[in-house]
Amino acid sequence: MRRAIQAIGTKACRVPRWSLTLAMFASSIAAAQSPPATQKFEDRNVLWDAIHQRCAPKAMRKIFPPAPCADVQLGPGGYAVFKDRNGPYQYLLLPLARITGIESPALLAADAANYPAQAWRARLFVEASLHAEQPRDVLGLAINSSQGRSQDQLHIHIDCLRGDVRDAIQRWLPAITQDWRPLPQGLPPSGHRYLAKWVAGENLDENPFKDLASNLSSKEALATRSLAVVGAYNAAHQPGFVLLSGRVDVAAGDHGHAEELQDPTCAIARRPP
């Protein structure tokens, strides 16, 4: 079974198996630290202010958890994990560096951190909130386009997939290759069109931001794209990922909101009896 990692600043304590303590911790963060659903983010720097004014200072003083964050990793490529207000299970991963969103050139630098890989590892917080480890095809990551987001600090949504999205991906998986190609049909819930690509491996070693950018035409900007990373198994039940990217199409009502592929209620999740 995968080892859970509780991180304090730049140090980590490895836990050999799932523990009630971790589950209770994640539940308490969800209950106590998530902003109320009625709160609106008119201020597009709410998340940036929270991690830098409250979370990072606590991590530097070695206070754990660095509330309102669940985790902060300091140093180069540092990031914070924050309980999202959307549903009881969704978490966000945010770089500590000032990176506005998917369009930032910093994500394509030679020494850029692979934030999606860090977010995939941080799915343990979602699983702890569910009190059960999940098959990889239950969970996914989402990054909205510049028009589809409410905050101007890069944040990666970590949550369960919609059941109908998982079913559609499984149905089309044999046709998804290692090259970016359009899916045969639009994805639920709104029928928006996505490009898809298969990436093999247990871990997300390939940086999805760089991979997507290298496959766009010179006339297409990353700001108009969304990105999703979905855990999956191939026909031989070998682990991998399906990368998905939508494009802003205002006329079609598509604002590049990849978060639409996720289900904050985690209806498809495995739960303990």
Image (cartoon, rainbow, N blue to C red):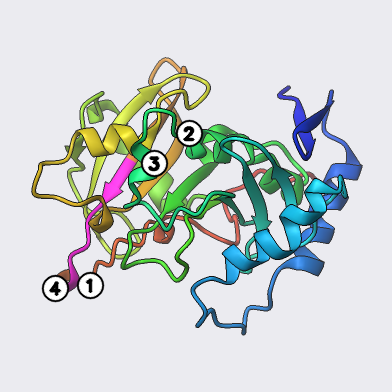
Q: What's the residue at 45%, 53% (across, down)?
A: 99
The quadrant of the rendering that contains the N terminus is: top right
- Asked if residue 30 is positioned above or below residue 178 in the image, the reply reads below
Query: Alpha-carbon distance for marks 2 and 1?
Result: 30 Å
Q: Viewer-proximal residue, 34 or 104? A: 104
Mark 2 near mark 3, Cβ–Cβ under 8 Å?
Answer: no
Element on which disc 4 rests: helix
Question: In the image, which is nearer the foreground, mark 2 or mark 1?
Answer: 2
- Asked if residue 29 is positioned above or below residue 129 in the image, the reply reads below
Residue 51 percent coordinates (x, y): 66, 59
Query: Alpha-carbon distance for marks 4 and 3?
Result: 29 Å
For marks 3 and 1, the one nearer the N-term is 3
- Is residue 86 in view? no
Q: What's the residue at 59%, 65% (across, down)?
A: 47
**Residue marked by disc 4:** 251
Q: Is residue 131 left or right of residue 144?
A: right
Give the residues drawn in magenta, as a range. 244-250
Look at label 3 and name its amino acid. Leu
Look at label 1 and name its amino acid. Gly
Question: In the image, which is nearer the foreground, mark 2 or mark 3?
Answer: 3
Query: Alpha-carbon distance for marks 2 and 4?
Result: 33 Å
Q: Is residue 253 left or right of residue 28?
A: left
Task: Tell me the tag on residue 253.
Answer: 1
Look at label 4 and name its amino acid. Ala
Residue 262 percent coordinates (x, y): 48, 56
Q: What's the residue at 40%, 61% (across, down)?
A: 260
Task: Tell me the tag on residue 114.
Answer: 2
